[in-house]
Amino acid sequence: MVNMQIEGFEELKNDFRKYGIEAEKAIKRGIDRTAIACETDAKRRLAGELGGKRRIKLNRLRASVHAELGKNTSNPQQNTFRPDKNSKPEDGEFGIAVAKDEAYVGTNVEYGSVIEYGSPPHDIFPKNVQALHWRGEDGEDHFAGKVSHPGFAGMSFMGFAAVNQQTKLTGRVTEELNKLIT
């Protein structure tokens, strides 16, 4: 999951207290817009855009990346993730309480962290079958009792999205607050 914070957030809320609930809603709109933008950036990165390497096998991971927006959200899409007919159980919510002035972006697909951070070289063995099976690029079937995986350096998609959107968070909140005073 992505963690971004606005320094001085509580002071900002206090400065705008005279605008009442409208100031809190404006701040929330800025937070929600940034969370949705992080979701979009992460998905685009997994799709091979924004400097990511296109990996056809990541479609399921890409579909699972979603933003969970806090309750009483200013955005009618409280949870932007909508499972499709091919979704599996782990494509659901994060299972955490999201405060009204927070939003979380991430995936709960178990191999997401391997794609984000990489993995060391390791051996792969068959489970519940006698041999591993795959179809090579040549179209031929291959079988093996063990495969030595060379490891994977990782391809940051969530961290990339967070860094890409971090500076925009404050701008979005400022833009929303300026709508109150202009």
Image (cartoon, rainbow, N blue to C red):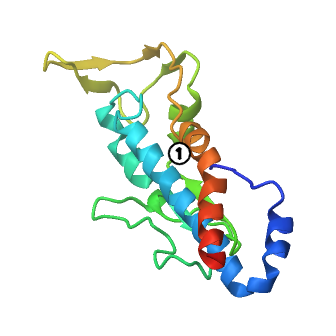
Residue at far left of view: 139
48 and 22: which one is in front?
22
Pick the front one: 83 or 141: 83
Residue 37 rendering spot, x and y as whole percentages: 49, 54
Is residue 70 visible from the viewing direction of this image? no
Please indicate whether residue 42 sits to the left or right of residue 74 in the image. left
Is there any visible trace of residue 104 in the rendered image?
Answer: yes
Give, as a three-letter code, the residue at label 1: Glu
Q: Secondary structure at mark 1?
A: loop
Residue 104 on image: x %, y % = 61, 59
The residue sitting at 51% across, 41% down in the picture is 112
Q: Quadrant of residue 11?
A: bottom right
Other-residue count near label 1 (Cα within 10 Å), few / some / many at <14 / 14–19 / ≥20: few
How many marks overall?
Answer: 1
Please tell me which residue is depicted at 32% across the width and 36% down the height of the picture. 57
User: What residue lies at 28% left-to-right and 26% top-to-bottom?
Assistant: 133
Residue at the front extreme? Answer: 182
Residue at screen point 59% across, 18% down:
120
- Please indicate whether residue 14 sits to the left or right of residue 38 in the image: right
Residue of label 1: 110
- Tell me residue 29's x, y (percent): 58, 70
Point out the image quarter for the C terminus: bottom right
